[in-house]
Image (cartoon, rainbow, N blue to C red):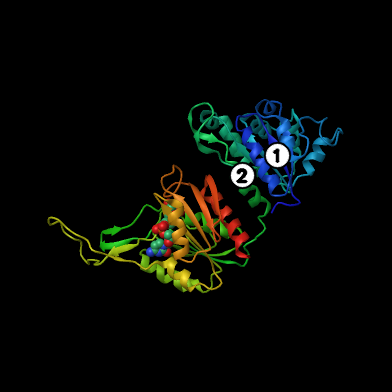
Amino acid sequence: MLQDKTILLGISGGIAAYKSAELARLLVREGCSVQVIMTRSAKKFISPLTMHALTGRPVYSSLFDSGYRTATAHIQTAREPDLVIVAPATANILGKLTAGIADDFLSTVLLAVDLEKCPVILAPSMNTTMLENAAVKGNIFLLGKRGYVIADPNDGDLACGETGKGRMVEPLELLELIKKKLFSEKDYQGVNVLISAGPTREALDPVRFLSNHSSGKMGYALARAARERGANVVLVSGPTALEPPAGIDFRPVVSAREMYAVMMDKLEKADIVVKAAAVADYRPVENFSQKIKKAGEMQVNLVRNPDILKEIGAKKNKQFLVGFAAETEKLLEHARKKMEEKNLDMIVANDLGQKGAGFQVDTNIVRLLYQGGFVEDIPLMTKYHLSHLILDRIKDHRGR
Ligand code: PMT
């Protein structure tokens, strides 16, 4: 996908520098040329030889060892790439970029990049207290306002032994961000994408219902990502606290039966259907018109709701059908079964037992299962970046 692209990868001195080797490997695997610039301290964390071996190009560290070997090498180096990424971006390099300081090759090249023509991604990585320091926070805010793309660090265990925000965004997630920035051209233009999100609520009486923990974040992130890529998006959503993305056809529903009716109504026009909603499999047999009063023991009889995805699977003609599976055990086994029973082209399996995956959180950890039995493991990343990755995979598999 990244053939013919040149990426400038700036590495400043932080422990996360080892992840940049993986980022370089992923970029090369995508077919692009990667030119690495390392600061002096970056070289203490990872060897230039490693980066040279991975990219097939010598690493630049100073004006005088760049390929150009001229007094204006910083300008030539800044004109070459289609995109620049600094990963990890330390407090120091962020501070220099904010203040316009150019005292080494990386900071000099960064100032020479024309942001109008070449996106620059900064992937901060540092201890939480440093990240929250007013100066660093202010610098990141200002850089974001000036048009730099900030890859907001993740929460988690930090190299210093503390836990908190400051972990550099994972390489695969950075790769998705790079693709997104390079191809903000609309690769889903004219494609009709029907997405379901959130929980359903199955009423028992006017004040009580059966439901689940779905926040809608996964489905809304998919809708936003698809819209950004030019798709005509219909988002059918159970009750959530989220603001629907702009520019989409938003269809709020409450119960599984309402979701079923809208999904079936919109199916014919859809090219791609993604069912991220957590639909209640059962509803109370009776929906009492008045609030049920306490009176000793009580039993609620349940009846099956329609399986929306299964029915779409049985009816589909041109549609590429993607389901989700949220499991607490035997993830692959259950996901495979659903894929088969519901006639899916792809299924996104979340392991609810993993921290950072599944309901409510902003991130997810999933396994993608495709027709033919191939399984792809996707590490922790934000639901938004995962959505772009899922859209990439749908694009790759739809034409097959
Ligand atoms: O909303 P978030 O808080 O961001 O959480 C995201 C999520 C965990 C809800 C999401 O990632 C997810 O996994 N959604 C599917 C959850 C689920 O209901 O899985 P399931 O195994 O019960 O259903 C399998 C598939 O069949 C799903 O695509 C579901 O939408 C669909 N289904 C299920 C039952 C039913 N009656 N009709 C359906 O269409």
| Residue drawn at x 72%, y 49% as measured from the top left | 31
Count neighbours of disc 1 (C-alpha within 10 A) and say few if under 14, some if 14 to 19, many if 20 or more: many
Q: Horizontal placement of 25 versus 325: left or right?
A: right
Quadrant of the rendering where the N terminus is positioned: bottom right
Dot 1 falls on a residue whose secondary structure is strand
Viewer-closest of 8 and 248: 8
Q: Horizontal placement of 249 versus 94: left or right?
A: left
User: Whole-Å distance between the Cαs marked 2 and 1?
Assistant: 11 Å
- For disc 2, the marked residue is 174
Identify the amino acid type marked 2. Leu
Viewer-closest of 341 and 236: 341
Question: Ligand 1: does it lie within 8 Å of the C-beta at label 1?
Answer: no
120 relative to 247, above or below: above
373 relative to 177, above or below: below
Question: Ligand 1: does it lie within 8 Å of the C-beta at label 2?
Answer: no
Count neighbours of disc 2 (C-alpha within 10 A) and say few if under 14, some if 14 to 19, many if 20 or more: many
| Residue drawn at x 58%, y 30% as measured from the top left | 135
Q: Position of residue 71 (x, y in %)?
A: 86, 32
Q: Image quadrant of residue 35?
A: top right
Return the disc, 2 or 1, that comes first in the chain's sequence. Answer: 1
Identify the amino acid type marked 1. Leu
Quadrant of the rendering where the C terminus is positioned: bottom right
Dot 2 falls on a residue whose secondary structure is helix
Residue 348 makes an appearance in the image: yes
- For disc 1, the marked residue is 9
